[in-house]
Every structure is written in C-alpha cells, then in structure tokens.
Image (cartoon, rainbow, N blue to C red):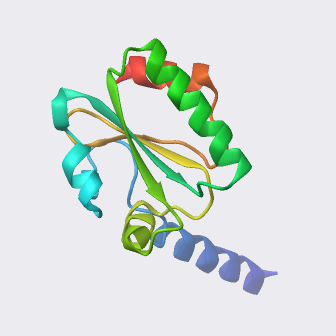
Amino acid sequence: MGRMIVVLFFITAMMTAAAPSAGAGDTIAPLSTSELKQVIGSGNKNTIVFFLNPSGGPCRAQDEILQKLGKDRKNNFNIVYVSATQAANQQAFYDYGVRSLPTLVLVGKSGKIGRVFPPGIQTYETLAAALDRM
C-alpha cells in the first residue's frame, strides 16, 4: 500500500512538472509562429489563439462560433489560427501544451495569457463572458 502511494505521488509530481507553462496570470504568451508574433498585442485587442485541425468536425463547429462572436462584437478581438496540419506550427503546440483539439487560449492586450480553455468546443456564452472579463 505504501509503495502504491509513493508511486502515485511520483506520477502526480511528474505530471505537475510536465504541465504546460501556458497558464493564466503573469505568463507571457509564447510567440512561436510568425502569425502569433504579428497578431498578439496588435491593435490593442485581446487575442484568441485557436489550435485546430481544419478538417475536423469539432474544430469547424468551434470556428463557426468564433466567427459569429467576432461578427457580433464587431471584431473587437483577434483570432489566430494555429493548424495541426502545418509543420511550422508544431512548436506552438509544444509551447502552449496543446494535446487535444480544438483548444482555445485567450491572450490579453498586454500579451499575457488570460485563460486556457479545456479542450473541446467552447460555447458562445463562455467565450463572450471570458472576453468581457479581460
């Protein structure tokens, strides 16, 4: 029993140490691609970094939600698409700790990560509320 607790503690410690550094708060958003460098912090707008597979059904559904939100909010935030199908984007996936798609990361005007959403489709309401809090 004691051995199992030690093993579980070790596994938990390793998972914590290997957790993505892209958390909320004071973490500066990694600028791993040319588009991220160009868009994050531009125009004094918040940015949603959208990690996706362009041919995946859930990713297409998430994009529809983002497009509607952008239209309703008169594009008062940026969207950066980071596609899993482009080799040049691989480093961004590592830097943000993305392992499942779709994944969204909200970056504030200052270039700091405001929120990392759990993988999966985020609702219009969830995204709108997160943008309002930024």
Identify the residue at image location x=54%, y=73%.
13
Residue 100 picture quarter: bottom right
3 over 78 or under it: above or below = below
Q: Where is residue 61 in the image (x, y as percent from the top left)?
A: 67, 38
Residue 59 in view: yes
Q: Residue at x 65, y 56 (%)?
A: 55
| Res 113 → quadrant | top left
Q: Nearer the viewer, residue 19 or 90?
A: 90
From this viewpoint, which residue is outermost toward the bottom? Answer: 3
Query: Foreground residue, 17 or 77?
Result: 77
Residue 121 visible in rendering: no
Give the quarter of the figure containing the C terminus.
Answer: top left
Residue 37 is drawn in which quadrant?
A: bottom left
Residue 113 position (above or below residue 132) = below
Name of the residue lying farthest toward the right: 1
- Residue 48: give x, y in percent of width and height: 40, 38
Image point (36%, 22%), residue name: 75
The one nearer the camera, 1 or 65, is 65
121 relative position to 38: left or right = right
Q: Position of residue 69 (x, y in %)?
A: 50, 21
